[in-house]
Image (cartoon, helix red, strand yellow):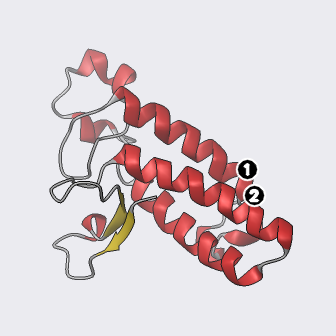
Amino acid sequence: MGEQYWLPGADYPDFMGGFFANTHQSEMPNSAATAGAVEILSAALMAAREVGDTTRAELYRTALLCGLRALLQMQYDDAAELFFVPSELHPMALGGFRTTVYDGRISVQAVNTAIRALSAALNALQTEDYPSSLAPSA
């Protein structure tokens, strides 16, 4: 799965956490690696719950929510984030995923992997898994 990182001293909150493969010393976190970790954590959470391992289930749930937060921070969900894209192309880019939180590149692989990961997380998470302040409104 690579590594999860959390940098409390980061310059911006969005740079604090995520996942990345640790196969190369210089490899930077990216949305495809983060999405891969989210997908794996979703499966691990479901397996832990199925066998009744509440300790591991809680660890997987917490890591999964952190991974989702990191992943969603890489999503283009506001037209203001598309300042570099001609306005007539905004509908085609909206909803894409940056390769990292600190640049504007969109990768087809990152988007595909992120959508699969979000789908897996929706299958794994239950309503009570969300803190009450983040629970969807009725």
Q: Where is residue 134 in the image (x, y as percent from the top left)?
A: 59, 68
Quarter-of-image position of residue 76:
top left
* Residue 30, percent from left and from top: 31, 49
Horizontal and vertical percent position of residue 101: 26, 52
* Badge 2 or badge 1: first in the primary sequence: 1
Identify which residue is drawn at 29% across, 71% down.
16
Q: Are marks 2 and 1 in contact (CB under 8 Å)?
A: no
CA separation in Å, label 2 and label 1: 19 Å
Instruction: Indicate the amino acid at tag 1.
Output: Asn
Q: Which amino acid does label 2 sit on?
A: Ala
Q: Is mark 1 on a helix, strand or loop?
A: helix
| Secondary element at image label 2 | loop
- Please rate how many residues cluster around mark 2, counting C-alpha atoms within 10 Å: few if below 14, some from 14 to 19, many from 20: few
Front residue of 23/40: it is: 23
Q: Mark 2 points at which residue?
A: 138
Q: In which quarter of the image is the C terminus?
A: bottom right
Residue 126 in sight from this viewpoint: no
Is residue 17 left or right of 11 when viewed as pictured?
Answer: right
At 36% from the left edge and 47% from the top edge, which residue is drawn?
31
* Residue identified by numbered label 1: 123
Residue 64 in percent (x, y) is at 56, 64
Q: Which of marks 2 and 1 is in front?
A: 1
Residue 133 drawn above or below residue 120: below
42, 85: nearer the viewer: 42
Name, please, the residue furthest toward the right.
51
Q: Residue at image x 24%, y 21%?
A: 87
